[in-house]
Image (spheres, grey):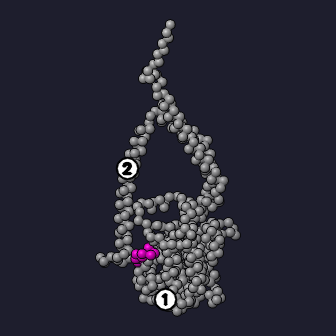
């Protein structure tokens, strides 16, 4: 008797496609679990190798803890990372795995993809509009700095500078009001702040050069209250104020290089340093100094990319480039001073709260930039009573200027200057 076997057609098989539909949710669940486990393990591993100053180096705005709260946060970051890593492995991973399995099981992937695409289109449109606005504002600022207004309005104090970004108009006095005081900012023929705009420093006299930003410039103070003037008066030497408001260390270095050849007897180059300048040193939207592969300083042009990329600089993380560039610029400033027989001196002070440090030790940022590089410095911690009046004011007042002047005078004794 013949036996005939009849296999059902594939289209009649009730389990056709079952393998695919069952496997997809399981695969999505596995991927979610693996990714969260790997991420959690990376956080736990990083917590064992991170040093105590990682948060100050990469996260805190002042590059140091300035309050007990930020100090505790900085020291707790590795522990927080370890806790988050364990949470991702033990709790978040299983939750995401189950959610991924349910979503793929219900076939909701297409709906989510459509919603994400709509959000992406809206974000792209907003970014385009924001870029147009940012470019318009940037162009107006640059045009205004290149050409003073001709409609009777007050002329600006600064001008466009192709090498430094901006500098002061020479031979001009600008009046402003800081608090309830009218302040005159006189800039001499060399573009330096001076007692009057119609004068000029004597290149033959022994001279101390001062460089820096708004604190060194003497923002909010009459000229005779600035520490630059006080040092010159007390030591009986000529002082020249090269500082420009808003400058980074590289721009201050550029002004020093410009000024040194003008003077026959430069005695010292005093550079004010605040931690806010570290981020300014890598502002790619202006001409700046950067590092070549061999570690030497090179001039870099201003970036021409999307202006909205500047928003990325506000993210709460930074790499190591700002510190490396800053260290190289400070070394170069000291070398330029010594090459002319002048004493280099750096004044580390604070714009806002001072850096916290253990008793008898320096703040880590001071150790990083000055102690390890054997650069001569003085640290002047300004207290609230040393600042100009005002709720949000961070610049030194007359008392703070006197404090800085005393520290500089102690470091630059007459005996040292004579030699």
**Label 2, label 1: how far apart the Cα atoms are:** 58 Å
| Relative to 313, residue 300 above or below | below
Q: Is residue 355 magenta?
A: no
Residue topped by disc 1: 201
Task: Tell whether position 164 is magenta.
Answer: yes
- Residue at 49 percent of width and 9 percent of height: 2
2 or 1: tag closer to the N-terminus: 2
Residue 372 falls in image quadrant: bottom right
Residue 119 seen in the figure: yes
Q: Nearer the viewer, residue 15 or 60?
A: 15
Query: What residue is shown with label 2?
Result: 122
SS category of the residue bearing label 2: helix
- Secondary structure of residue under mark 1: loop
Q: Residues within 10 Å of mark 2 (few under 14, many from 20)?
A: few
Residue at figure coordinates x 56%, y 63% from the top left: 320
Q: Is residue 180 found left or right of 46 in the rendered image?
A: left
Q: As rendered, which of 53 and 13 lies closer to the eye?
A: 13
Residue 6 % position (x, y): 46, 16
Which of the numbered marks, if any, corresponds to residue 265? none
Q: Position of residue 96 (x, y in %)?
A: 54, 40
Which residues lie in the magenta part? 157-165
Does residue 152 sit above or below 291 in this rendering? below
Check disc 1: other Cα within 10 Å, few if <14, some if 14-19, many if 20+.
some
Is residue 391 visible in this depiction of the protein? Answer: no
- The furthest residue to the right: 360
The answer to which of 396 and 102 lies nearer the viewer is 102
Provide residue 279's location: percent of width, then percent of height.
Answer: 52, 66
Q: Residue at x 34, y 76 (%)?
A: 147
Residue 382, how many percent across, how many down?
A: 58, 72
Going 51% across and 86% down the picture, which residue do you hit? 261
The quadrant in which residue 92 appears is top right
Residue that sits furthest to the left in the current view: 151
């Amino acid at each position: 008797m013949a036996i005939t076997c009849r296999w059902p057609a594939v289209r009649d098989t009730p389990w056709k496609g079952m393998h695919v539909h069952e496997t997809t949710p399981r695969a999505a669940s596995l991927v979610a679990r693996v990714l969260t486990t790997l991420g959690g393990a990376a956080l736990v591993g990083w917590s064992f190798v991170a040093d105590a100053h990682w948060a100050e180096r990469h996260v805190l705005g002042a590059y140091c803890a300035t309050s007990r709260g930020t100090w505790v946060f900085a020291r707790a970051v590795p522990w927080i990372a370890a806790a988050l890593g364990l949470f991702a492995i033990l709790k978040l991973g299983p939750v995401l795995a189950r959610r991924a399995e349910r979503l793929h099981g219900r076939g909701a992937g297409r709906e989510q993809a459509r919603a994400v695409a709509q959000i992406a289109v809206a974000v792209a449109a907003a970014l385009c509009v924001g870029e147009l606005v940012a470019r318009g504002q940037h162009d107006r600022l640059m045009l205004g700095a290149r050409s003073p207004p001709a409609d009777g309005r007050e002329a600006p104090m600064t001008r466009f500078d192709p090498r430094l970004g901006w500098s002061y108009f020479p031979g001009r006095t600008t009046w402003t009001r800081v608090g309830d005081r009218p302040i005159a900012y006189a800039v001499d023929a060399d573009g330096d702040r001076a007692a009057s705009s119609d004068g000029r420093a004597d290149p033959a006299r022994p001279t101390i050069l001062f460089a820096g930003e708004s604190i060194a410039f003497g923002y909010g103070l009459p000229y005779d209250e600035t520490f630059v003037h006080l040092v010159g008066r007390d030591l009986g030497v000529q002082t020249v104020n090269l500082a420009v408001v808003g400058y980074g260390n590289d721009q201050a270095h550029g002004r020093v290089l410009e000024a040194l050849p003008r003077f026959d007897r430069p005695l010292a180059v005093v550079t004010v340093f605040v931690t806010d300048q570290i981020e300014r040193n890598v502002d790619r939207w202006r001409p700046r100094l950067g590092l070549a592969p061999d570690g030497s300083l090179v001039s870099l042009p201003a970036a021409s990319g999307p202006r909205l990329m500047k928003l990325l600089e506000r993210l709460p993380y930074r790499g190591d480039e700002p510190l490396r560039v800053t260290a190289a610029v400070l070394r170069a400033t000291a070398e330029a001073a010594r090459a002319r027989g002048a004493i280099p001196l750096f004044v580390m002070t604070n714009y806002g709260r001072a850096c916290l440090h253990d008793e008898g030790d320096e703040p880590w940022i001071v150790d990083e930039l000055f102690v390890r590089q054997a650069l001569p410095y003085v640290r002047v911690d300004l207290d609230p009573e040393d600042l100009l009046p005002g709720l949000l004011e961070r610049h030194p007042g007359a008392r703070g200027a006197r404090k800085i002047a005393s520290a500089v005078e102690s470091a630059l004794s007459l005996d040292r200057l004579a030699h």
